[in-house]
Each structure stands twice: as structure tokens, then as C-alpha cells.
Amino acid sequence: MKHAILWTCMFASFVANAETTIDPASIYSSHCAACHGADRLGGMGPALLPESLERLRPDDLLDVLRNGRPATQMQGFSKELGDATIKQMATWLRSAPAATPRWEQADIEASRIVYHAPGTLPARPVFSADPSNLFLVVEAGTHHVSVLDGDKLEPIHRFTTRFALHGGPKFSSDGRYVYMASRDGWVSKYDLWNLKLVAEVRAGMNTRNLAVSEDGEWVMVGNTLPQTLVLLRASDLSLQRIYPVTGAGGKSSRVSAVYDAAPRGSFIVALRDIPEVWEIPYIGKKTFEPRVIELTDVLDDFFFDQPYRHILGASRTATGQVIDLDAGRKVADLALTGMPHLGSGITWKRNGREVMASPNLKQGAISVIDMQSWKTVATIPTNGPGFFLRSHEATPYAWTDAMMSPKRDTLQVIDKQTLAIVGNVTPSPGRTAAHVEFTRDGRYALVSLMEADGAIVVYDARTLKEIKRLPMDKPIGKYNVFNKTTRSSGTSH
Ligand code: DHE
């Protein structure tokens, strides 16, 4: 009893003191470092650097510090620290550490874990489902991936992932391996035939995305912290080369995204802070030397035509531009003003001409662009700003969401020829629905009910009738092996 009173007094005085002057670094050491790393670079919990917290709203960060995160090891500190201290800790966590964090060759090499050496797992699937019609569903809630049989539309396996995967997982061209990037810089290679994690490496402290070369030999990772590109051997994720991302003028830049331009045998890299595009060839002499294309504006987001000759790019502040990769220069402007989400663009043939369509993050509209004249041929009004647009060669429709608007629970279905909205689906009123991927034959559309107690909702792509729903934990994205490896024009690659 005596102890309890003494402890309560000490605790009260600690809180009172903490509310006036606190030493955030020492509170961090005693309360946070064990899980998030002494250097804030992450450990069992995620990194706590300003870049890592960018996407967390101020109130959400305070809520996590006060009340913890359900179903994780993160406990709440409201009783222990008091509200004023928690607010100061939140400010401190959003400030850069006194010593600039570094992630260099030795750190990358030391982080690498090889669970199964190349060639040690059998080269045949351990399940009876068609391996080319599997789906990977990224469940962001408690960081899992579910593997679905795309014919029976049933889960066959589920595994835990690194904290906060982002971007599409990328498949080897035979569909056996999948490579996933986490926002904290972890790259994981998974063997889908054996349902086993093969290797992992931390390529950066804050990562945009990764690309896998068509020949299956290389993985390129684009980072925002440090500002680097990291080339890995795909077989075992060992480090091949680090590129500091520094432009012609000596300024360094965050990477916007890196993609595999398979028909060109190269990686294409867009940069966020300097007006340059880099092309890094991986076939031929294998010097991996970047070819730099200078631009007049930076690229925050971009899209390729199917032959990978042109990039349609946009910055967050200006309108778009078309870059001819062969000529190495801008060839047209794009009249896009609603902050297009070009990474979600798709193409199809309409009246004998190729068109590209993209949702807009700040406008309830789908922009449709002619791929020869580069003119906007239609602006289709939608329920509100959306994130994703998806279709398939075998369906006459394209599906879009309005997840950045009050109508975030409804997807609209657009006829690809008339450009009219011909239907809509609302999986659960009031709950966010977005991101569609089709089965290999285009017969069914799988929609994410993006909630903690969410689901993959399967629709008949022709009648728009619900077929079934599979419970999932915040399924932010799903990826069909066939559609991705054959580079379907209705989905992202
Ligand atoms: Fe994404 C893909 C950028 C926020 C879910 N997102 C991508 C890609 C880029 C990108 C460059 C393509 C990478 C790839 O597939 O290789 N995303 C951005 C942003 O700049 C933005 C707006 C802000 C940010 O901080 O990154 C952003 N993205 C989000 C989200 O808030 C989403 C909805 C949820 C989340 O957990 O991050 C989200 N992004 C996704 C998904 C994909 C994606 C599901 C893969 C789409 C696909 O079908 O390929």
C-alpha cells in the first residue's frame, strides 16, 4: 500500500513536471525506443521519422499516442504521460532528428535476411489452384496478405507482411515470385508456388515503390529517405548498386516512382524535386548507367503508353506533359487540371483510336485523352474525386471510385465506348469502397471494402450483381497474377 501511494505521488509529480518542461529524447528512450529503435528508424514497430509520419493526420497521431493501436503491441500513454506531454512528443516526433539519419551500403547489407537460398525450394506449386489466376490481397489493417484462388474465389493462404506495404506488389514474369515494398523501406520476396518468404532487405528508410526487371534479374527500389535508388539482385535481394539521386544542377531529389519499361529493357525513374527523368537500362552491356532526360517540370505521377514509348506525366501543381522517351524530350502538353492520378490510368480502343483515362484526386471527373493527338476527348463527371480506375480487355466497362468524397461508398461503372455512366455499386452504405481488379477472364470484378472489418466483394462484371464477399482486414489493394504479368491494359503494371 505504502508503495502504491509513493508511486502515485511520484507519478503525479512526473506528469506535472512533464507538462511544463519535458525532455522528449529521454521520454522517447524510456517509452518508445524498445519498439521503434533508439535512432527512430523502426524495429518491431515502424520508423518514427517526419517522413514516416507524413500521412498520419495530427489528431490521429495524438490518438495513437494517447490510446495505442488496437490489435498491435502499441499501448496508449495517456495515463502515464499526460496530455501536454503527449502533444509535445507528437511535435518532437514530427521534427527531424538532431543527427541526420543515414542508411548506407553497410546498413542495407546488414539488414538482409535470406530465409531460403535460391534454388532450394521446389519449382512447382504446393496447391491445386491455377497459379496464374491467383490474387494477392494486401490487407493494411494488421499487415497481412491473403492469397486467393481466382477460379473458386476463395482464400488459400494468408501471411504477415512488413508494416504498411504500399504500391502494387510486382510479380516475376512466370508469376512464381512476388516482390513487395513497405513504406519503411523493407523489400520482401515471396515464393507464391511454395507459399514461403524467401528473402528480405531494408533498402531505405522511406520508400516510394519498387520495380522488377522483365528478365527477372533485378529489383530497383526508389526511396525518398535517403534520396537514393537501390539496385538489388532479384535472386537473393543482395545489393548491386546505390544511386544517389542528384540532378545535373547538384540538387538531390526524392523519387516519385520507378517502373519497369519491359519493351525497352530499362527502368524509368521519375523524380519529385528535380525536372528530370532517368532511364536505367538493364539489358545489353549491363552498365546500369542512367540516361538523364531533362524536363521543364517535375513529375509527381505518370503513366506509360503500352509500348513504353511515351510518358504522360503531371506535377501536383501544374498541368501535364507528354515525354517521348526515344526523342528524350517533351512533345506535348496535357490539359489536366484536377490533379490527375496518372498511376491509375488505363487504356483501351475507342472508335479505332487508343485512349487513356485517369481519375483526378481533386476533381470528380475522369479525364479521357486521345493517345495520338494528346487532346482531352472527354471529361466524365463522377460522384467525386477518386483514386483508382480499372478495366479488363474482356469487359466493356471501366470502374471508378469516389473515395475522396462523401460518396466514397459507391463505385461508378463507365461504358468504354459511349463514355456514359451506366451503373453503380454500393457494397455497404457509408463505408469506403475502392480499387477494383478483374479475374483473369474479366468475368468478375473484385472490389475492396476498405475498412478494418472490410471485405473483398465480388461482382459479376456484366450484370453488376454481387456474387459473394470474403471478409478482409482493410484490403487496400488486390492484384491478379495473369493480368499483371501479361500487362493487361485495364490495370496498373
Ligand atoms: Fe498510393 C500505388 C503514390 C497515397 C494506395 N501510390 C501507388 C503508386 C504510387 C503511389 C507512385 C504506384 C507504385 C507502384 O505500384 O509501384 N499514393 C501515392 C501518393 O503519392 C499518395 C497520394 C500519398 C503518399 O503519401 O504516398 C498515395 N496510396 C495512397 C493512399 O493513401 C492509399 C489509398 C492507401 C495506403 O495505404 O497508402 C494508397 N497506392 C495505393 C495502392 C496502390 C498504390 C493500393 C497500388 C495500385 C495498383 O493497383 O497498382
Image (spheres, helix red, strand yellow):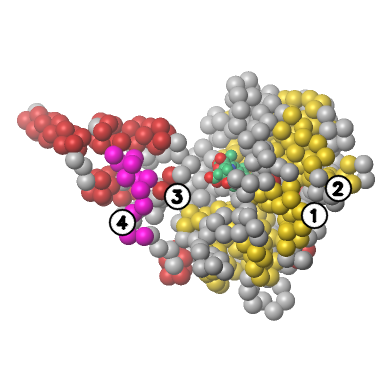
Q: Amino acid at mark 2?
A: Glu
Which element carries disc 4, helix, strand or loop? loop
Label 2 packing within 10 angstroms: few (<14), some (14-19), many (20+): some
191 relative position to 452: left or right: right
Q: Do the residues under discs 4 and 3 have CB atoms within 8 angstroms?
A: no
Q: CB of mark 1 within 8 Å of CB of mark 2?
A: yes
Q: Earlier in the sequence, mark 4 or mark 3?
A: 3
Secondary structure of the residue carrying tag 1 is loop
Which tag, 3 or 1, sits closer to the chain's start? 3
Circle 4 crowding by C-alpha within 10 Å: few under 14, some 14–19, many from 20: few
Q: Disc 1 residue type? A: Gln
The answer to whether mark 2 is within 8 Å of ligand 1 is: no
Q: Is 25 placed above or below 200 here?
A: above
> Mark 2 highlights which residue?
354
Residue drawn at point x = 39 percent, y = 54 percent: 41
Asked if the residues shown at circle 4 and circle 1 are in contact, with their CB atoms under 8 angstroms apart, the answer is no
Side of 226 relative to 376 (left or right): left
**Where is mark 1, residue-wise?**
306
Specify whether residue 142 is painted magenta. Answer: no
Magenta range is: 88-100
Callout 3 secondary element:
helix
State the CA–CA distance, disc 1 to disc 2: 10 Å
Residue 139: x, y in percent?
57, 40
Mark 4 — residue? 98
